[in-house]
Amino acid sequence: MDVNSSISLLSNIHSITADFLTEKLKAKGFPEFASSHGNILFQLSVNEKMTMGDLSEKINRDKSTTTVLVRKLEKEGFITGESDPSDKRSRIIFLTEKGKQFNATARELSQELLSTFYKDFSESEKQQFFESLQKIKKNFA
């Protein structure tokens, strides 16, 4: 491999880490989700309640795609929603107890993932790697 294979390598690492989390979550009794489902649950753990519009913006998906994702999570009992009292056309989405349990488990598994991810890295190597990733992201902004 050479540096021109970086995007392929990043894609491969993304797949490996997603598989790692999927298998660990399945072993703990959680259903298999797309990464966007996990992102919705994460955003709701950070923001507690969100409108569908805010949620679609945070997960970088259009509103119709977000609606489909939210419906699956509602059907599985991880989130619920209610009409926004200030705007009846809008829904406010929030975590159920099951969604909170999922996020607690996901946090634990994320720590395990990070330990594996950064195995044999020094603190300065971790920081340099993170800064390089931020620079790449900024290049596409």
Image (cartoon, helix red, strand yellow):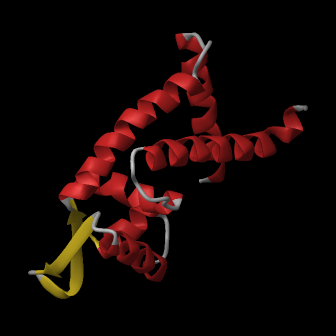
In screen coordinates, is 107 left or right of 1?
left
Specify the quadrant of the image occupied by residue 20.
Answer: top right
- 87 w.r.t. 124: above or below: below
* Quadrant of the image containing the N terminus: top right
Residue 40 sits above or below residue 134 on the image: below
Q: How many marks?
A: 0
* Residue at the image position 9 percent from the left and 81 percent from the top: 85
Is 102 left, or right, of 136 in this rendering?
left
Q: Is residue 46 visible?
A: no
- x, y percent for residue 63: 43, 79
What residue is drawn where x is 35% and y is 52%?
42
Q: Hey, which residue is sitting farthest right in the picture? A: 1
Residue at 32% from the left image edge and 50% from the top image edge: 102
Q: Is residue 108 above or below residue 90?
A: above
The residue closer to the viewer here, 25 or 127, is 25
Q: Is residue 55 visible?
A: yes
Where residue 52 sits in the image (x, y, percent)?
Answer: 32, 74
Q: Residue furthest bottom?
A: 89
Image vertical order of residue 115 relative to residue 113, above or below? above
Closer to us: 121 or 97: 97
In percent of width and height, residue 65 lies at: 48, 78
Q: Nearer the viewer, residue 108 or 47?
A: 108
Q: In the figure, is residue 35 to the left or right of 80?
A: right
Horizontal arrangement in the rendering, residue 141 relative to residue 53 (left or right): right
Task: Say which residue appears at 36% left-offset and 78% top-offset.
Answer: 71
